Image (cartoon, rainbow, N blue to C red):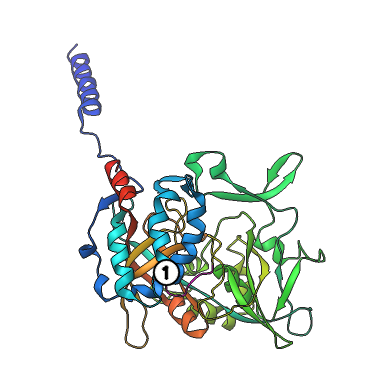
Amino acid sequence: MMRTGWRSLAVLVLLCFAACAPKPPPAPPALAFRAAAFSDLPGYAADRVADALPALIRSCARMIPRNERALDNYERYGSGNDWKAFCSALAALPPGNDAALRRLIETELQPVAVIGDGKAEGLFTGYYEPLVRGSRQKQGRYSVPLYRQPPDLVQVDLGEFRDSLKGQRIAGRVRDGRLRPYEDRSQIDAGALANKNLELVWLDDAADAFFLQVQGSGLVQLDTGAKTRVGFAAQNGHPYVAIGRVMIDRGTISREDVSMQAIRAWLRANPDAAPELLKQNPSYVFFRELPAPKDDLDGPPGAQGVALVPGRSLAVDRSHHALGLPLWLDAQQPALPTGDKPLQRLMVAQDTGGAIRGAVRGDVFWGAGTEAESVAGRMKHPGRFWLLLPKAVAARLLATS
C-alpha cells in the first residue's frame, strides 16, 4: 500500500513536471525588420554613392513596369507604383553627383535593418567573372565541355505553386508523367550528355570549368583570338555542395586556410584525386552564349536580368528578398597585403545563387579579371545590411513586423 502511494505520488510529480515546466522561448523568426535612420548606417557619409547609380537605374527599369504588381510577388516590398517616384527621379540625376543622389535617397527612402533568425549579422562572400581559355572545337588541350541547357531539362519555380515555397526551384526530366531527377555531376562527367550536340565551347582546364559553374558566368578567350561571354542558362536540380567544406571535413585543408585560390592550387597539385573531389558537388550548371561586354560596367546579367555592376551588385537569398532592392552593406573585404578593410557602401540586390541562403546573407560581385578573383576568392566575412525602401512601404512593413 505504501509503495502504491509513493508510485502514485511519483506519477503526479512527473505529470506536473511535464505540464508545469516552463516552455522554451519560441524560435526567432527567420526574417524580421527594425526601424533605422541614415545615421545608423556605418560609413554612409564617406561612400561614393553615385557609383551605384548605373545599378539603381538598371533595376528600376525592371521594377517600374510592374505597376500594381508586387516586386517578386512580395507584398512587403511594395509594387512598381510604390517605387515610381524614386526611380523616375533617378533618370534626371547628373552622373557622378553624390550629393544629388544622397538627397534623393534621404527624401524618398527609409533604412530598415534586416534580422535573420534573431541575428543582425550574417555571412558575406564574393564572386567574380572568370576569364578562361577555350575553343569552338574539341581539339588538342581543349577537351573539357561547357554544355548548353539540354532540351529535356525541366525547371520548376515552386513559388508558383505555394507561397511558402517562394524562391525555391527544382529541375529534372519528365518520365512516365512524373518529374524525375536529372543526371548529377558524376554522371555528366562520365559522358551522359556526350554526342548530343550540346557542347557550347571546349575549355583546356577542368578546374576552370568547375569554377566557371560556381561563378555562373565568365569570359572565354577563344583560340581564334576572339572573346565571348557565357552565362547561366540552367542547373540540373541537384543541391550545391561546397567542395571547400568537403575538404575541411576530410582534413585536407584547414578552415582558416580555405579559399578559392587554395582549392584551385590543391586541384592542380593533385590531378588524379581532383575528379573524385569535384564529384562531391552533384550540382551542374548549363550555359548560354551572351554578347561580349561593352565596358567595365557591363557585367554579366544577374537573376534580375540586368547587367551586374562590379562592387555594387549583390546576390541575395530570393526566398527572403526581392531583386532590385537598394540596400546599405556593412561588411569587410580582403585587401592584400594589408589585411581586411571596411566594405560600407550602397548596393543593389540583383542576383542570387545556390549557396546564398539566409535573410542576412550576400555575395558581392567584384567584376572580371585577376584582381576581382583575388578579392572574391578570399572574401568570407561577417556583415549586416539595411534595406532602403520607399517611406510608405517601410512604414507598412514595420507596422506588421
Measured as percent of width and height from the top left, residue 317 is found at 45, 56
Categorize mark 1 by other alpha carbons within 10 Å: few (<14), some (14-19), many (20+). Answer: many
Measured as percent of width and height from the top left, residue 102 is found at 30, 68
What segment is highlighted magenta in the picture? 307-314
229 to 363, vertically: above or below: below
Tag 1: residue type? Thr
28 to 282, vertically: above or below: above
Measured as percent of width and height from the top left, residue 232 is found at 61, 65
> Label 1 belongs to which residue?
125
Image point (32%, 83%), residue name: 339
Q: Residue extending furthest front?
A: 92
Does residue 64 appear left or right of residue 13 in this picture?
Answer: right
Q: Quadrant of residue 19?
A: top left
Q: Is residue 321 visible?
A: yes
Image point (76%, 78%), residue name: 136
Inspect the magenta stretch and tell me whether residue 382 lies in it. Answer: no
Does residue 5 appear left or right of residue 54 in this picture?
Answer: left
386 to 73, vertically: above or below: below
**Which of these two is toward me, 260 or 389?**
389
